[in-house]
Image: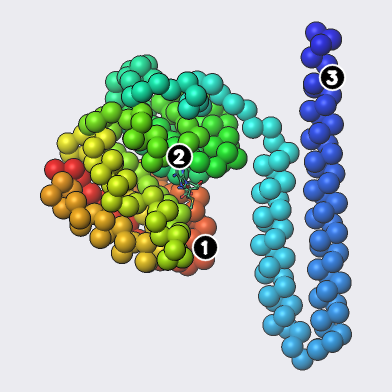
Amino acid sequence: MDTHKPTIEFNALYRTATKVTLITCCVLRAAFRVLRAVCRVLRSPGDCYRRTQNAERSTKQHAERLTRIFWLMARTLRDYPQISLKPENLDGKIDFVRLFGRAGPLHIEIGSGKGTFLVSEAKSKPDDNFLGIEWAGRYYRYAVDRAGRWGLTNVRIIRTDAAVFLAEHVADESVDCFHVYFPDPWHKRRHNKRRLICPANMENFIRCLKTGGQIKIATDHADYFEWIKSVIAGESKQLREIDFIRPAGAEEGELTGTNFERKYIKDQRPIYTIAVRKR
Ligand SMILES: C[S@@+](CC[C@H](N)C(=O)[O-])C[C@H]1O[C@@H](n2cnc3c(N)ncnc32)[C@H](O)[C@@H]1O
């Protein structure tokens, strides 16, 4: 019993210190902004209305962001070993029936972020199996914690590079649907080659899909969308375009119901979607 005590105390101390530091930062930041706003009004009273409005908006955005970071840091994210799949434990192609402990349609979400889509879709389709692939450690941990707290038994999440994972661990004709929502656009021309949707990865998606399986993609980036359509057009012998059906978890006015979509809707950005089926 005694051997556990220092760890518990250290955790509590760490969390308190984190909270105190963040609250101090918030207060100092707010004070600094008020001071700056007062200085502006004193300097140019005629221009102050527009400036104050802008400052208020950005302060609000900042406060929201700090609050999100604060809660993320203050909350201990739990690992759920039955959900988190460790790359180091994988050897060759995965037997998904064994992994999920049952057969069922397999969905893979690439870039699952905080797991909003994964969790809501897994809840609404309890007979289907869902695998999320996420590269960023903090999003991966957040999604695992979230799926674990919901007690979902049909979700697995892995932290790895999706392109490598598909090539090494996903067997031919094993996937029913790929979901790729808001992949990083890599908008600078010299970075375009890093885009997830590219001819080489598309070949791999097609190899992994069952006949009749689907790929569903959404992006807010017009240039990337054109690029995606041209990659798909290059595979027209194997893929045909179908209607993009909104997932069950998408709310009124949403197409996918992911975190990024919700953010982009607030910013009034256009959203482009495409869905294809393997012939
Ligand atoms: C713009 S975010 C979208 C997240 C989520 N789909 C959403 O809509 O809220 C893109 C996500 O894809 C992840 N990502 C990018 N490239 C990846 C890769 N090669 N393998 C796995 N995840 C990747 C990033 O870490 C990031 O979390």
Q: Is residue 260 found left or right of 9 in the rendered image?
A: left
Mark 3 = which residue? Answer: 6
Find the distance from the CA under tag 3 to the CA under tag 2.
37 Å
Q: Decide if ligand 1 comes within 8 Å of the CB at mark 2.
A: yes
Which tag, 1 or 3, sits closer to the chain's start?
A: 3
Image vertical order of residue 256 relative to residue 146, above or below: below
Q: Amino acid at mark 1?
A: Lys
| Point 24% across, 31% down: residue | 172
Question: Is the residue indicated by label 1 positioned so its CB lies within 8 Å of ligand 1?
Answer: no
Q: Work out whether 39 lies above or below 141.
A: below
Q: Secondary structure at mark 1?
A: helix
Cα–Cα gap, marks 1 and 3: 45 Å
Residue at the image position 81 percent from the left and 33 percent from the top: 14
Residue 214 at least partly seen: no
Residue 161, numbered circle = 2
Q: What secondary structure is marked by label 2?
A: loop
Q: How many marks?
A: 3
Find residue 34 and name its label: none
Q: Residue furthest top?
A: 1
Mark 1 crowdedness (10 Å alpha carbons): few <14, some 14-19, many ≥20: few
Q: Residue type at mark 2?
A: Asp
First along the sequence among labels 1 and 2:
2
Residues under numbered marks 3 and 2 in contact, where contact means CB atoms less than 8 Å apart:
no
Residue 187 quadrant: bottom left
| Residue projecting furthest to the bottom | 46
Q: Residues within 10 Å of mark 2 (few under 14, many from 20)?
A: some
Q: What residue is rendered at 79% in x and 14% in y?
A: 4
